[in-house]
Image (cartoon, rainbow, N blue to C red):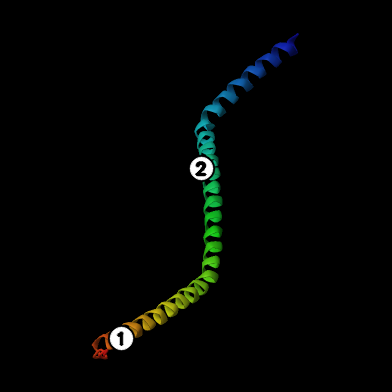
Amino acid sequence: DMGLVHGKREAKKVEKLEGRVSKLTMGYNKRAQAMVKEQAELLDKIEEETLALETYKLLAAYEGDAIPKRVAALTAQLDEQKSKETALQKRYQDLLSAQNRPAAKVM
């Protein structure tokens, strides 16, 4: 009987002490929870940015391969256009020359 009363008293003391400890550490616990949340957010952001960086590196590699091909295609188009322009200028010059020549008289 006495042990039961003593046990209840000790339980109340322990409960009071746990309440005090809880009050004293409540701020630390809230701060720790906030820091854990912030850490998780930062890790997510790092993961997103790493993925974006890898994507841009891959795009840069593709573009690095594609640029010489595009330049070659554009150069070929330019050369083709230049030859067409040269041919058209020659034809124009020939037509002007033919127009300026005196026409042969038909009898």
Left or right of 18: which side holds 31?
left
Mark 2 highlights which residue?
38
Q: Residue at x 65, y 15 (%)?
A: 9
Quarter placement of the N terminus: top right
Residue 19's x, y, as percent? 57, 23
Q: How far apart are marks 1 and 2 (CA)?
A: 78 Å
Q: In this view, does 37 lie above or below 96?
A: above
Near-viewer residue (4 or 63): 63
Q: Which one is nearer the viewer's eye here, 42 or 82?
A: 82
Sort mark 1 into few (<14), some (14-19) or many (20+) by Cα contacts within 10 Å.
Answer: few
Checking the image for residue 49, the label placed there is: none
Question: For the residue marked with disc 1, what is the amino acid?
Answer: Gln
Q: Which of marks 1 and 2 is nearer the N terminus?
A: 2
* Residue that appears at 41% across and 82% down: 83
Choose mark 1 or mark 2, whichever is in front: 1
Up the image or down, 29 lies above or below 63; here it is above
Residue 57: x and y in percent read 54, 63
Q: What element carries label 1?
A: helix
Residue 50 in which image quadrant = bottom right
Residue 51: x %, y % from top left: 56, 54
* Point 74% across, 13% down: residue: 3
- Mark 2: which secondary structure? helix
Q: Which amino acid does label 2 sit on?
A: Glu
Residue 35 horizontal/vertical position (percent): 52, 41
- Residue on which the image places disc 1: 93
Report the label total: 2
Determine contact: label 1, label 2, CB under 8 Å: no
Report the residue at 63% width, 22% height from top: 14
Whether 41 is drawn above or below 11: the answer is below
